[in-house]
Amino acid sequence: MAGGDELNLLGTWPSSFVTRVQIAVGLKGLSFEYAEEDLNNKSELLLSSNPVHKKVPVLIHDGKPISESQIILQYIDEAFNFNGAFLLSADLYERAVARFWAAYIDDKVGHTSYMELLICGFNRSMKLCFPVLSSGVS
């Protein structure tokens, strides 16, 4: 990584919010250290890095913590914008549509589908969520 930037990601494997950060870091071609958090026994690093929400993901860049997955994605896109490679389109409308679907997934699908998955199982959960999501994909 250029400039000696150090990236650390605090996360937990079942979190889609952590996964989206891992994907973004990978798309940017960045290397990072990953620390799996036990959310039943949160580390001092997590508690001090995200004292407000005390949750993952947290990206630590050169010792400075950034919380909340959407904010982390914006940070990654702005801080590591070499070679003109951006996560979102340059077209303002396309950016707005992408942000709409990200917010929709966060607000409506993420938590609901996770709870549905726990309660009713994978097949029923996908039957409920997939039609709405596929309507937004062209």
Image: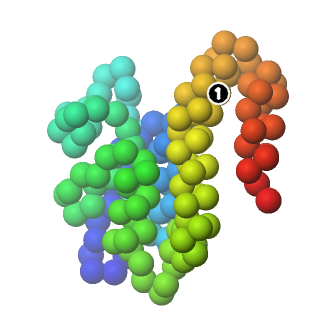
Between residues 90 and 80, which one lies in front from this camera angle?
90
Amino acid at dot 1 = Ser
Query: How many numbered discs?
Result: 1
Q: Quadrant of the C terminus?
A: bottom right
The percent position of residue 65, horizontal first and vertical second, equals 24, 52
Tell me what residue is drawn at x 73 percent, y 14 percent: 120
14 left or right of 10?
A: right
Say whether residue 132 is left or right of residue 101: right
Residue drawn 29% across the image and 65% down it: 6
> Looking at the image, is 84 positioned above or below residue 129?
below
State the residue lying farthest toward the top. 119
* Nearer to us in this view, 69 or 128: 128
Is 31 placed left or right of 118 in the picture?
Answer: left
Quarter residue 124 falls in: top right
SS at mark 1 in the image: helix
- Would residue 15 be visible to someone looking at this image? yes
Q: According to the image, what is the colour scheme of the structure?
A: rainbow
User: Which quadrant of the figure contains the N terminus?
Assistant: bottom left
Task: Tell me where residue 116 appears, x and y as whole percent.
Answer: 66, 19
- Report x, y in % for residue 47: 22, 34
Q: Residue furthest front?
A: 93
Q: Is residue 116 above or below residue 84?
A: above
Residue density around tag 1, few if under 14, some if 14–19, many if 20 or more, within 10 Å: many
Give the residue at x 28% y 71%: 5
Badge 1 is on which residue? 113
Image location (x, y in percent) of residue 81 = 42, 78
